[in-house]
Image (spheres, rainbow, N blue to C red):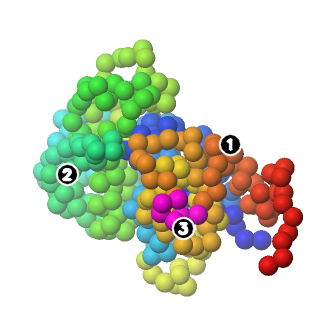
Amino acid sequence: MSTFTVVLIVPTGVGAAIGGYAGDALPVAKAIAEISDRLITHPNVLNGAQLYWPLENTYYVEGYGLDRFAANQWGLHPVRQNKVGLLLDRGIEPELRLRHIQAADATRATLGLNLTDYVITDAPLEVELRTADSGASWGTIGNSGSLLRAAEKLITQGGAEAIAVVARFPDDDSPELQNYRHGAGVDHLAGAEAVISHLIVRNFQIPAAHAPALNPLPVDPEVSPRAAAEELGYTFLPCVLVGLSRAPQFVTAPQSLIPDSIWAESVDAAIVPYSACGGSAILSFSSSPTQIIAVTNNSTQLQVPPEPLGVKVTKVNSYLEALGVLVALRAGINFPVFHPNLSSLRCL
């Protein structure tokens, strides 16, 4: 029997009701991993600042790489452990930089992760944050060349097989940030974070993820449980290092040359918020046999349902219902049979 493989996507920076905060889609991933042989998802789902959860059958794949995988341009090669390079923005203040280095050392001593020596960019990255008309977050990097030079140094001199970036993000106490902390807004950092990791993955074809460097915010008794993981300390780095330590390597060679690699044709189901079906990965899966499951109660700031795009989906109300569809798919059951009004066969 073939391996049952599921892809879970919650787009970053779009205000998803579940998965738009600090790793709050991780319980969904844990549940799906229990009923799948393989779960492929991305850092936005699994990153919870200093909180994370080891899932042996779950693959941590950066968003640009996931898009290439869904398009069947890249494969995924599972690894036992990556050597992770730590890339620090020169714009981080010395004390805040030390906090992140200590966090990285802690993952080596306490979790046994394999890290290279770190590098500091030759110029501040100068991250700026933006908000689109839709309400989704995005951003720019003033010195993208400095980012890429530092990444190349980690790879060529440090032997890095994956790269964790820590960039200094602007401190902010805007109403939008307060809304996010209270569980009713968009993660205004997420869009810029995606730009950073996309640049590295696109240029070097190795796993990458980002953790922002920020000064701690004042204590707020009204912080939502969904955002509370970001209130735990000085750094969001631990979950990124843990995820990258076992992130699959990208395969750009023909399938036959890399044994045991995973390709898009093996994906049985992909799960996505109903209002966010316009992403590259879902559009790629829509032209394949992959069953796309769209979850309506995971609302986002986007208004991109599947129907106008011609994307055929199984529409469900919740992730609990999506889990039921996955169980039926895995069992080889035609899940519409669970509807009480099953019509008779008709003559063609």
Q: For residue 286, which numbered disc appears in the image?
A: 3
In the drawing, what numbered circle is on residue 133?
A: none
The type of residue carrying mark 1 is Leu
Per the image, the residue denoted by label 2 is 141
Q: Is 308 inside the magenta-drawn segment?
A: yes
Residue drawn at x 39%, y 32% as measured from the top left: 185
The image shows residue 265 at horizontal and vertical percentages of: 59, 74
Estimate how packed mark 3 is, as few (under 14), some (14 to 19) or many (20 or more) residues with alpha carbons within 10 Å. Answer: many
Whichever of labels 3 and 1 marks the residue nearer the N terminus, that label is 3
Q: Can you give x and y, in whole percent of width and height, for residue 143 in the image? A: 15, 54
Relative placement, left or right, of 236 versus 79 is: left
Residue at the farthest top position: 221
Work out whether mark 3 precedes mark 2 in sequence or the reverse, and give the earlier one. Answer: 2
Q: Is residue 88 visible?
A: no
Residue interval drawn in magenta: 307-312
Measure the alpha-carbon separation of dots 3 and 1: 23 Å
